[in-house]
Image (tube, rainbow, N blue to C red):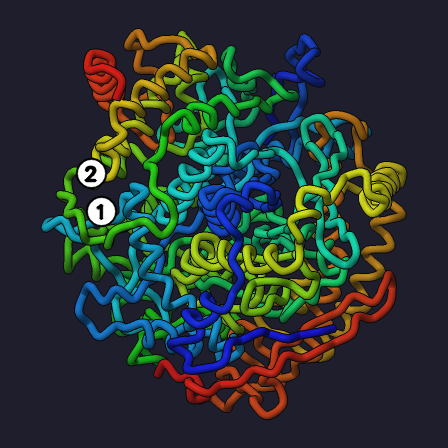
């Protein structure tokens, strides 16, 4: 497997400028001769499809949702980072870059992260121009707030609905291109495989989830913007439809999968209340700006929060990390909550929760101000728990939220399959082993608006000769073969005719993953998961029941395909977690911790990205490494004390 | 608790459809409404029957995918909420619950409780955007926007495009949805150059899609999960009138 990262030569600050000059261009008149497939319509996919359309390419954009506007980027609450330094508090592109590499626990690629920080300011400009109603000061200027893992205020936000507003911005741009005829939207359409012709990605096979029709689509390049795989845990903050299918198919077609074990557990979510829970709800990290996290000092204290006096409360984040306090990064805060709950200090019925308390903030700035900042979040919490967070502290617990791992891509966001690109959460490159808050929106839009539109052109100019453009043809034998495989698999799923529902398998897989590959991992647990998952997979293929018919609308077929893919992917995650015996970021190996229980990295052995190559059904995947060089950032023990 | 469900079942667009009685058993008060449906579906699958098809995705009240007329009210009895955020503690043991899809000419039923809302996308495609290409933006601080105006734009932009406004309107009108989109951009300087064009194009598309007109019932405001006020409809009407009187651009 060729892992040439194509990082340009030269000083960090000049790499992207230089590379943009070195890349080949496609003449404006020739762009309309090319066709590009974009799978996914979230921030990365929506932005890329719109921008490529603006440039003059023909774009086909696919999403399984009923509208491009519903992709799960919409649920991001807190904000988007940029180094505008409007608050004059010492921010710079260099600091944003440095914070992001440090926040990722030194497991990301310097050049990619620097480029991300470099284009971040342009993203804010672009979004404002589209009409994104960011929060403003009375003087009419944009407001900023703080977020975890940074000591400057660099986060732009639109109430607690930043993701929604940014996505609507991208969706509007996309709608404009649909209107102009450059983009064709294919909603309610799920991608089920990538088609390769002569080793290059030249199309996809899809299923129309309304009619059940299997379709072939050909193009000169394929962009996967299909998000993360957090739903492998069954319970996560992801939407119900989020899945790993597109990324897993790409992996099976030869794209390397990097760092699958790097998953982010978000510290502030509403705790699990019952067996029937279908998903977990995030409470934005921005709440930690004003909320204080605590547990009782006494083990198993059953008193209501209001009756626990101040000196009997343990504000454990402020105690352990005095300089960052409640704004310690996500991985650190999550582990600290788990540590307190495991030790018996948790609150609520299950003991698996800690308090996030706004009493001080309400006293300091008033209920009105708190409501203006977080009103919709407080309302959401109230609806779900039937408790009023203005009166009693919120109860929160960590939950699976984001996946830093993803398809391996080079500096141009191209996977190891030529012509196949991965953008946004779907790739691995920018967040290392832990993502900082308000960085996912930044990365999705950076990839979509400002990076892929250049690099895809470079690929087309070199590898899709004009005579061949548009000739990638759905009648090619490769399309027929891939389509046959897709049909065969759906047929097999429907044909099992077993007794257990798809959902029940998903829940069981989720439990294995959470128990053994969740917030803390160890050798024995991971080995047992690697034994259990294939057994569960076998049971699935022998006893799953997919009701209904293969024709027409049947949501159970869609779900069955996704769960079958999670059953494969979960094993890969555990293998990766087993191999990486160090702790870093969100990946905490119990064997590798300091005396104080902090993550202990092993830079000598693990300063690389693990890239897995598919070797065939039932064969162990091969591991490759991309060594990470740090020329500009000093490797240090990450400290937020 | 146990519930007596009356659910709209329709195998596809061609099927006439009918209400079907289904017993829901073992429902707990802290389940969300959709988790109750998950449980009912698991029981149906175990009994060898076909589960109820319904639209849903984020389950945190922001994607706008979930729908459902619950006992005749869009998104159910709890105000300012989506079906996914409605919890079973709003119901009591033994209750009868009637569940129907959004009903409007412009939202044809796909299956059971799922409807096709692509007409909303086509209305936005007609002009619900600012024409600015990636890379062409001026500095974010080039325009100062008074906080009150930015807040109004945000009030309108909070729309999640769920379609409850249409489903609850006796005329099947999409005025609140369209007004929210138009109002969002009309309150920002970035939206001014295309303001007249946008109002005309979006209203025209709304008519083409077969949505009805507004006759001031305000049912839409009452069920809107994001509490978008009908004042935006008044503003849209002014924009549309002005655009119609002032010629082509």
Q: Closer to the camera, B106 or B201? A: B201
Residue A30 % position (x, y):
55, 46
Q: Residue at x 53, y 86 (%)?
A: A600
Q: Tell me: residue A431, above or below residue A212.
A: below
Q: Is residue A243 visible?
A: yes
Circle 2/circle 1 CB separation < 8 Å: no
Q: Is residue A400 visible?
A: no
To which residue does mark 2 refer? B189
Residue A372, labelled with which disc? Answer: 1
Q: Quadrant of the C terminus of chain A?
A: bottom left
Give the quadrant of residue A515: bottom right
Check disc 2 and report its element: helix, strand or loop: helix
Q: Residue at x 33, y 21 (%)?
A: B176
Give the quadrant of residue A114: bottom left
Check disc 1 and report its element: helix, strand or loop: helix
Give the quadrant of residue A129: top left
Q: Residue at x 44, y 70 (%)?
A: A16
Q: Tell me: residue A475, above or below residue A622.
A: above
Residue A24 % position (x, y):
53, 62
Residue A79 % position (x, y):
35, 55
């Amino acid at each position: 497997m060729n892992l040439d990262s194509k990082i340009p030569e030269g000083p960090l600050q000049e790499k992207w400028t230089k590379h943009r000059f070195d890349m080949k261009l496609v003449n404006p008149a020739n762009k309309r001769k090319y066709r590009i497939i974009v799978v996914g319509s979230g921030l990365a996919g929506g932005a890329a499809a719109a921008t490529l359309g603006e440039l003059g390419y023909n774009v086909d954009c696919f999403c399984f949702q009923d509208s491009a506007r519903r992709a799960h980027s919409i649920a991001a609450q807190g904000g988007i980072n940029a180094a505008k330094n409007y608050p004059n508090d010492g921010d710079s592109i260099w600091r944003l870059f440095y914070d992001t590499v440090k926040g990722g626990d030194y497991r990301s690629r310097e050049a990619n992260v620097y480029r991300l920080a470099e284009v971040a300011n342009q993203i804010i400009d672009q979004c404002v121009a589209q009409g994104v109603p960011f929060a403003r000061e009375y003087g009419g200027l944009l407001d900023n707030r703080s977020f975890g893992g940074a000591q400057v205020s660099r986060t732009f936000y639109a109430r607690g609905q930043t993701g929604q507003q940014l996505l609507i911005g991208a969706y509007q741009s996309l709608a404009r291109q649909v209107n102009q005829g450059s983009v064709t939207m294919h909603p309610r359409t799920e991608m089920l495989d990538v088609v390769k012709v002569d080793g290059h990605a030249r199309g996809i096979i899809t299923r129309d989830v309304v009619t059940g029709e299997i379709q072939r689509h050909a193009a000169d390049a394929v962009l996967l913007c299909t998000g993360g795989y957090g739903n492998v845990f069954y319970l996560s903050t992801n939407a119900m439809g989020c899945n790993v299918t597109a990324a897993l198919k790409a992996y099976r077609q030869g794209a390397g999968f990097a760092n699958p074990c790097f998953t982010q557990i978000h510290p502030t979510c509403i705790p699990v209340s019952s067996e029937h829970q279908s998903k977990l709800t995030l409470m934005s990290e921005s709440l930690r700006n004003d909320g204080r996290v605590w547990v009782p000092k006494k083990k198993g204290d059953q008193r209501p929060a209001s009756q626990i006096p101040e000196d009997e409360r343990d504000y454990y984040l402020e105690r352990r990390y005095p300089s960052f306090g409640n704004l310690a990064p996500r991985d650190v805060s999550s582990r600290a909550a788990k540590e307190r709950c495991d030790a018996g200090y948790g609150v609520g019925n299950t003991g698996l929760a800690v308090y996030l308390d706004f009493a001080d903030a309400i006293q300091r700035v008033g209920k009105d101000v708190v409501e203006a900042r977080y009103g919709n979040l407080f309302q959401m919490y109230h609806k779900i728990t039937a408790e009023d967070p203005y009166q009693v502290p919120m109860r929160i617990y960590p939950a699976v939220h984001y996946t830093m791992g993803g398809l391996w891509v080079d500096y141009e966001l191209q996977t190891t399959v030529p012509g196949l690109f991965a953008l946004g959460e779907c790739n691995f490159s920018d967040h290392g082993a832990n993502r900082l808050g308000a960085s996912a929106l930044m990365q999705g839009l950076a990839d979509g608006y400002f990076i892929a539109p250049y690099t895809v052109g470079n690929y087309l100019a070199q590898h899709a000769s004009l005579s061949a453009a548009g000739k990638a043809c759905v009648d090619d034998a490769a399309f027929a073969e891939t389509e046959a495989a897709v049909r065969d698999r759906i047929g097999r799923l429907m044909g099992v005719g077993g007794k257990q529902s798809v959902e029940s398998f998903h829940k069981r897989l989720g439990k294995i993953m959470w128990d053994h590959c969740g917030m803390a991992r160890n050798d024995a647990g991971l080995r047992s998961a690697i034994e259990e998952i294939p057994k569960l997979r076998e049971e699935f293929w022998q006893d799953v029941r997919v009701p209904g018919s293969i024709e027409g609308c049947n949501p159970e077929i869609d779900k069955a395909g996704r769960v079958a893919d999670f059953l494969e992917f979960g094993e890969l995650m555990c293998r990766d977690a087993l191999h990486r015996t160090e702790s870093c970021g969100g990946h905490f190996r119990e064997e590798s911790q300091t005396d104080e229980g902090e993550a202990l990295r092993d830079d000598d052995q693990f300063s690389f990205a693990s890239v897995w190559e598919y070797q065939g059904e039932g064969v162990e995947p091969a591991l490759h490494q991309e060594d990470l060089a740090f020329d500009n950032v000093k490797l240090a023990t990450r400290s937020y004390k | 608790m146990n519930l007596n469900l009356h659910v709209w079942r329709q195998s596809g667009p061609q099927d006439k459809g009918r209400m079907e009685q289904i017993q829901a058993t073992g429902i707990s008060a802290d389940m969300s409404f959709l988790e109750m449906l998950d449980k009912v579906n698991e029981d149906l699958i175990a009994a060898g029957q076909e589960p109820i098809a319904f639209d849903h995705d984020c389950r945190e009240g922001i994607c706008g995918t979930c729908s459902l007329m619950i006992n005749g009210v869009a998104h159910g009895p709890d105000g300012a909420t989506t079906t996914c955020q409605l919890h079973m503690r709003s119901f009591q043991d033994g209750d009868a619950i009637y569940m129907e899809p959004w009903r409007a000419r412009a939202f044809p039923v796909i299956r059971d409780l799922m409807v096709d809302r692509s007409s909303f996308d086509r209305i936005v495609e007609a002009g619900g955007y600012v024409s600015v290409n990636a890379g062409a933006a001026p500095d974010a601080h080039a325009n100062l926007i008074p906080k009150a105006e930015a807040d109004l734009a945000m009030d309108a932009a909070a729309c999640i495009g769920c379609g409850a406004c249409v489903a609850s309107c006796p005329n099947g009108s999409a005025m609140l949805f369209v007004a929210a989109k138009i109002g969002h951009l009309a309150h920002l300087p970035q939206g001014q150059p295309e303001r007249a064009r946008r109002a005309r194009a979006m209203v025209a598309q709304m008519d083409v899609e077969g949505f009805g007109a507004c006759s001031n019932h305000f049912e839409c405001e009452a069920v809107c999960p994001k509490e978008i006020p009908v004042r935006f409809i008044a503003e849209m009407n002014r924009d549309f009138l002005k655009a119609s009187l002032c010629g082509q651009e």
